[in-house]
């Protein structure tokens, strides 16, 4: 059972470490992050004089509330959103394990739920990105990410300090990601 008094304003920030591609939490590197899905959001900040936008996935386990931050307009975020959209029901708690691996210098990320890896909801061919020129491909990708983000917010937005009855009453289930 998740502790009903988890302080969601005390977030543990999770980012991707550039050199290894692993998840970085408080200076430690991990292959993956596991927790119950609380919802989605985004934030902006300034880095080296340039505005940056991040896509945020919020997970909670018994000890921590994680804010996984991914570059908003990136191929990795497109992949993550496509997998998240394949989840059927956002009203029930979802125990997710998110892992990242490089394969042939390609950014790969995997999400496991109920001992199965999530598949993409929309096949790459259906997105019609393959034959586009680079600039148009990126513009189209970014438009898709924007639409999917808005849809994910209608399914499961996360707002700090909003403890829902659902998140306070999650029962432990046998959903080991390994």
Image (cartoon, helix red, strand yellow):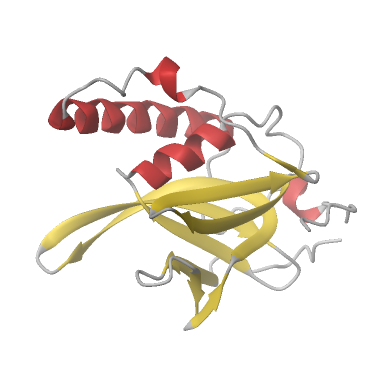
**Residue 136, relative to residue 34: is it above or below?**
above
Picture coordinates of residue 100, whole percent (x, y)? 53, 57
Quarter holding the C terminus is bottom right
Residue for point 37% across, 26% down: 147
Furthest-bottom residue in view?
27
| Foreground pick, 74 / 43 | 74
Whether residue 57 is visible to the viewer of this picture, yes or no, is yes
Q: Is residue 32 left or right of residue 149?
A: right
> In the picture, residue 44 is in which quadrant?
bottom left
| Foreground pick, 134 / 169 | 134
Please count the marks in the image.
0
> In the picture, residue 163 is in which quadrant?
bottom right
Quarter holding the N terminus is bottom right
Whether residue 8 is visible to the viewer of this picture, yes or no, is no
**Residue 6, relative to residue 131: is it above or below?**
below
Furthest-left residue in view?
49
Q: Is residue 48 left or right of residue 171?
A: left
Q: Is residue 115 left or right of residue 120?
A: right
Picture coordinates of residue 50, whole percent (x, y)? 12, 60
Picture coordinates of residue 94, whole percent (x, y)? 73, 44
Residue for point 41% across, 46% down: 76
Picture coordinates of residue 34, whole percent (x, y)? 67, 60
> In the picture, residue 141 is in which quadrant?
top left
Q: Is residue 47 left or right of residue 160?
A: left
């Amino acid at each position: 059972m998740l502790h009903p008094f988890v302080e969601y304003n005390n977030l543990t920030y999770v980012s991707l470490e550039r050199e290894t591609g692993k998840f970085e939490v408080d200076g430690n590197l991990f292959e993956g992050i596991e927790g119950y899905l609380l919802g989605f959001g985004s934030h902006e900040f300034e880095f080296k004089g340039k505005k940056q936008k991040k896509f945020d996935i919020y997970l909670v386990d018994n000890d921590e509330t994680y804010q996984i931050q991914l570059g908003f307009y990136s191929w990795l975020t497109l992949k993550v959103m496509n997998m998240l959209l394949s989840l059927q029901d956002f009203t029930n708690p979802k125990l997710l394990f998110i892992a990242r691996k490089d394969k042939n210098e390609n950014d790969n990320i995997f999400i496991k739920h109920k001992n199965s890896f999530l598949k993409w909801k929309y096949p790459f061919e259906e997105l019609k990105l393959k034959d586009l020129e680079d600039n148009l491909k990126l513009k189209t990708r970014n438009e898709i990410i924007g639409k999917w983000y808005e849809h994910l917010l209608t399914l499961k937005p996360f707002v700090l300090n909003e403890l829902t009855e659902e998140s306070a009453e999650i029962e432990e289930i046998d959903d080991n990601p390994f």
